Image (cartoon, helix red, strand yellow):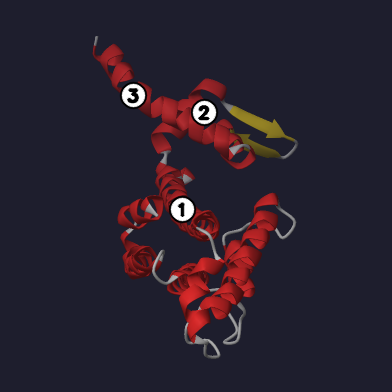
């Protein structure tokens, strides 16, 4: 569970999930049904938060599996992708956790005294760890995928806005380029070299503009000497 703790410490948005982790750890040996219940609730909370942040509406009666699958879709994973298939399998494990909780919970349908004494023994320690860890792996992955993709999108958007160049605002570069390559005529039409580069290959225009700006100090020194 340390990896999940480290993940929610890294991304403050998810700090409330700590209460689920405390309950899982606190009852792992004494009352495994409580650990199961909180593991399932944690994973469902992560899925719902992702859907909410991505403005993806979930039906009020959405099943546990539906929440998880919708969360993966909201993150951009295709329905036929490997991650989606794996997530579906892990979601099924988590669904079985819910069935297991009902089977061993002391408040589910009532238990005889013998059943209450033996209910935790129905699941050995290794199986407990496997079931809980499987759930936590999905939670960590979903949180990581959401946060990393969100940050990448934000950075990309800023970079794009920062690098966007308006033709009319780059007069110094346009003049430099036009002096070097002149004007091109096509019948009754003629276009400046800078206009052609800007409209035909904006990426190349941006690259050349950047190189021109970086070379400006050197050009200025050359002119002074």
Q: Is residue 206 above or below residue 69?
A: above
Q: Which one is closest to the eye, mark 2 or mark 1?
A: 1
Q: Residue furthest top?
A: 225
What residue is shown with label 2?
Answer: 178
- Quadrant location of the C terminus? top left
Q: Secondary structure at mark 1?
A: helix
Task: Looking at this view, name the residue that lies furthest to the front.
Answer: 114
Q: Residue at x 24, y 14 (%)?
A: 224
185 vs 106, nearest the viewer: 106
**In this view of the protein, can residue 70 be seen by the observer?**
no
Mark 1 is surrounded, within 10 Å at the Cα level, by few (under 14), some (14 to 19) or many (20 or more) other residues, namely some
Residue 2 lies left or right of residue 194; in this view the side is left
Asked whether residue 196 is in view, the answer is yes
Q: Position of residue 17 (x, y in %)?
A: 37, 67
Q: Position of residue 102 (x, y in %)?
A: 56, 80
Measure the C-alpha gap from mark 1 to mark 3. 43 Å
Asked if residue 169 is positioned above or below residue 154 in the image, the reply reads above
- Work out whether mark 2 precedes mark 1 in sequence or the reverse, and give the earlier one: 1
- What residue would you read off at disc 3? 216
Residue under label 1, please give it: 144
Residue 59 found in image quarter: bottom right
């Amino acid at each position: 569970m340390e990896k999940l703790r480290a993940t929610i410490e890294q991304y403050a948005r998810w700090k409330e999930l700590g209460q689920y982790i405390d309950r899982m750890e606190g009852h792992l040996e004494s009352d495994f049904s409580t650990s199961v219940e909180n593991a399932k609730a944690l994973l469902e909370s992560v899925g719902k938060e992702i859907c909410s942040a991505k403005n993806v509406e979930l039906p009020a009666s959405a099943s546990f599996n539906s929440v998880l699958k919708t969360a993966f879709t909201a993150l951009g994973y295709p329905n036929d992708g490997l991650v989606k298939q794996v997530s579906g399998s892990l979601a099924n494990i988590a669904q079985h956790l819910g069935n297991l909780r009902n089977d061993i919970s002391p408040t589910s349908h009532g238990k005889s005294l013998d059943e209450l004494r033996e209910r935790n023994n129905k699941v050995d320690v290794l199986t407990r760890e496997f079931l809980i860890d499987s759930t936590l792996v999905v939670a960590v992955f979903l949180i990581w995928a959401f946060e990393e993709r969100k940050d990448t999108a934000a950075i990309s958007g800023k970079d794009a806005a920062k690098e966007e160049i308006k033709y009319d605002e780059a007069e110094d570069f346009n003049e430099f380029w036009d002096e070097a390559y002149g004007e091109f005529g096509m019948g009754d039409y003629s276009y400046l070299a800078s206009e052609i580069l800007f409209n035909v290959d904006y990426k190349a225009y941006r690259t050349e503009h950047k190189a021109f700006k970086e070379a400006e100090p050197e050009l200025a020194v050359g002119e002074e000497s």
